[in-house]
């Protein structure tokens, strides 16, 4: 009888241990976020595709497996539909009644792509206009919040990713690690679909990637 009671006790304890472990890992991942993006806007002009994504990310921004202090950001990206002359492009971003101005910075990876961090978050319901000025002409696009229609928000995508790979995180990542939660899209616009991209990266180069469809909530890719 004593053995039966001990066996029953073990059966009750093991699930509780796994639940507690899962909760601890969820919290550890949330405490080690290096970049989380809550919303995604897009629009276009005759010559430019424009996107804006905002959230919280570490500053300084270092891919080193160690999450730093988080600050607000909104990154505006413009991508030329055709080759763009390298003449410098100014921006004006109107967010509701606020106007921000400055110069776009050219991407070091793509000469037809420019961007700027506005240094603040935006809300899904904000009315946003982006003007691109080359010194002679100006083009403007009203941005639409695409992520407002997602069935899975950033926090939910992170939780689902952790549940999917929690054993891999515990067994494959060593030491410190940081977490990235981003919206990605098809740059060539061959498909009009966005995905949640969740990356767990440790300080020794170990990586675990989960890509989730924000509408069907299905895991599209898991790489460990």
Image (spheres, rainbow, N blue to C red):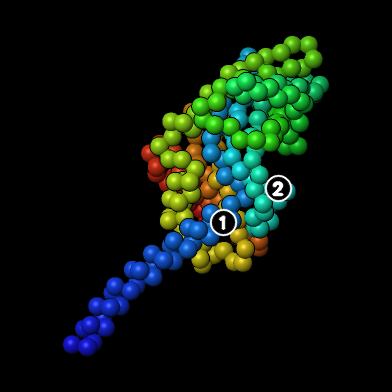
* Residue found at the very far bottom of the displayed protein: 2
* Observer able to see residue 190: no
Q: Residue at x 38, y 39 (%)?
A: 216
Q: Where does residue 198 sit, x and y in percent of width and height?
A: 53, 48
Q: Residue at x 54, y 31 (%)?
A: 123
Q: Residue at x 74, y 17 (%)?
A: 133
Q: Residues within 10 Å of mark 2 (few under 14, many from 20)?
A: some
Q: Where does residue 111 sit, x and y in percent of width and height?
A: 74, 30
Report the front residue among 30 and 114. Answer: 30
Q: Is residue 179 above or below residue 113?
A: below
Q: Where does residue 1 sit, x and y in percent of width and height?
A: 18, 87
Marker disc for residue 31: 1
State the SS at label 1. Answer: helix
Q: Residue at x 67, y 14 (%)?
A: 139
Q: CA distance from mark 2 to mark 1?
A: 15 Å
> Sequence-wise, which precedes: disc 2 or disc 1?
1
The image quadrant of residue 45 is top right
Would residue 143 appear left or right of 6 to someone viewing this image? right
Q: Where does residue 148 sit, x and y in percent of width and height?
A: 46, 31
Q: Which residue is mark 2?
A: 59
Exactly how many numbered labels are in the figure? 2
The image quadrant of residue 80 is top right
* Observer able to see residue 94: yes
């Amino acid at each position: 009888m004593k053995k039966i009671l001990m066996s029953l006790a073990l059966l009750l304890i093991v699930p509780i241990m796994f639940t507690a472990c899962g909760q601890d890992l969820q919290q550890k991942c949330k405490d080690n976020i290096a970049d989380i993006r809550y919303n995604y806007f897009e629009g276009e002009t005759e010559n430019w595709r424009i996107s804006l994504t905002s959230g919280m990310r570490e500053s300084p921004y270092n891919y080193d497996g160690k999450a730093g202090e988080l600050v607000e950001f909104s990154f505006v990206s413009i991508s030329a539909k055709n080759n763009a002359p390298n003449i410098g492009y100014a921006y004006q971003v109107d967010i509701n009644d606020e106007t921000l101005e400055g110069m776009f910075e050219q991407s070091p990876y793509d000469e037809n792509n420019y961007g700027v961090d506005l240094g603040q978050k935006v809300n899904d319901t904000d009315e946003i206009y982006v003007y691109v000025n080359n010194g002679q002409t100006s083009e403007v696009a009203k941005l639409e919040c695409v992520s407002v229609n997602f069935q899975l928000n950033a926090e939910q995508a992170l939780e689902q990713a952790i549940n999917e790979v929690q054993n891999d995180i515990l067994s494959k990542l060593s030491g410190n690690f940081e977490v990235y939660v981003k919206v990605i899209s098809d740059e060539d616009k061959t498909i009009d679909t966005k995905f949640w991209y969740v990356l767990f990266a440790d300080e020794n180069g170990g990586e675990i990637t989960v890509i989730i469809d924000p509408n069907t909530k299905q895991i599209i890719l898991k790489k460990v």
